[in-house]
Image (cartoon, grey):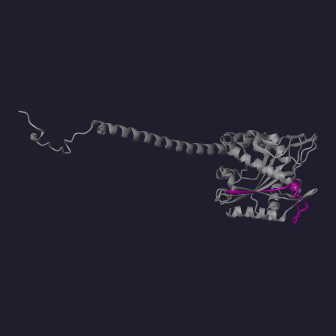
Amino acid sequence: MSRGNDSLPPRRTAGPQTQRRNPSSAPPPAKGKSKKTKKKRSLLARIFRFILILILLVFLAVAAYAGYLYWLLEKRGVGIDQPVEEGMMASTKPITMLLLGTDNRPEHPSNLTDVIMVVSMNPATQSATVVSLPRDTYVELSGYKKTKINAFYSRFKGKEDSSGITAVDEMKTFMGKYLDVDVDYVTVLDFQGFRDIVDELGGVDVNISQDMCYTDSVDGTDINLTKGPATLNGDDALDYVRYRKSNCSPKTAGSDDFDRNQRQNEVLNSLMDQMQSLGGVLKIGSVLDAMSSNMQTDIEKAQIKSLISTYWKISKQNVTFVPVTGTWRSPYVYINDKELETAKQSLQSTIAGAN
């Protein structure tokens, strides 16, 4: 006799321990989950360790490079062997330096200063101001003969034996009085040193604003530059910053001291990029060689190390270029008084940490 569904006993409701699961939706066994978690954690740990090692290597590389750089400075003999007065290190106080570029070359000996820049640097703000003055600036300053600014260093050099005062010290006093700042150091670089530094760094990238052509058989000058972007070697870079007039056929447009100052700033910017690049870092030894044989400075060796460690990575955005202009009335440039005052205030503001 068959039974109907109504006669079947009721089904038991499955409890937590007896409920059947759909195999396709079931979670993986606890053992498998543990393996994947361990693998994930192991990978993250390896990545983290790699990052830590990388950071450590970077710090070690920087430390090793700083040590190598200081060794190079000692070997090349850059700077003078004198102690730095307490509290005067560049890492702790603002420094103001006069930079002079002389027209001295093997083919043309001279102490006239074609490049005149005053730089103030502040370690707290990691900022600098660079004031550039035209070489033909007419100077009328109490206690000094009225003449072009580029003649003073040469005059002081000629009087060193009779006055007993070095030209460098005379320039500190003179420029400090002219710009109302205390000048701590003077660095003089001749044109041959400029050429060598540019060549050692592989050239400088500039955007030539116009065609430039000029020749001079007396000192061997042969300027022939074409308008547009270019990478200039040492000779061409020197021609670029020195160009003033043309005697070629056809002639190219002339250039005044103000244009020259702008080009000097452009080249200085490019050199900063080159020095802070990996290529520049690797060539620092050759650059120091070029500097040591063509440069005179009264900066102490310990101070040079402090300057490098403090300002090696200064941002170009924190470097303010202040070219001073004026009116050309042959043979002088008569400086714009307002621009000169602005330049003084900019230097003083950097020293005070206001910019």
Asked whether, in this view, residue 29 is left or right of residue 353, the answer is left
Magenta stretch bounds? 127-154
Question: Is residue 115 positioned above or below 343 on the image?
Answer: above
Q: Quadrant of residue 180?
A: bottom right
36 is within the stretch colored magenta: no
Name the quadrant containing residue 283: top right
Image quadrant occupied by the C terminus = bottom right
Measured as percent of width and height from the top left, residue 226 is found at 83, 41
Residue 350 in percent (x, y) is at 70, 61
* Residue 92 against residue 225 in the figure, above or below: below
Q: Is residue 141 magenta?
A: yes
Q: Is residue 240 visible?
A: yes
Query: In the image, what residue occupies the spot 73% across and 46% down?
Result: 270
**Residue 78 in view here:** no
Which percent across, then down, holds residue 216? 92, 41
Image quadrant of residue 228?
A: top right
Look at 73% across and 64% down and name the residue there: 348
Q: Residue furthest top?
A: 1
Specify the quadrant that holds the N terminus. top left
Q: 48 or 293, which is in the foreground?
A: 48
Residue 173 on image: x %, y %: 81, 61
Q: Which of the pair 219/322 is nearer the observer? A: 322
220 with respect to 237 (left or right): right
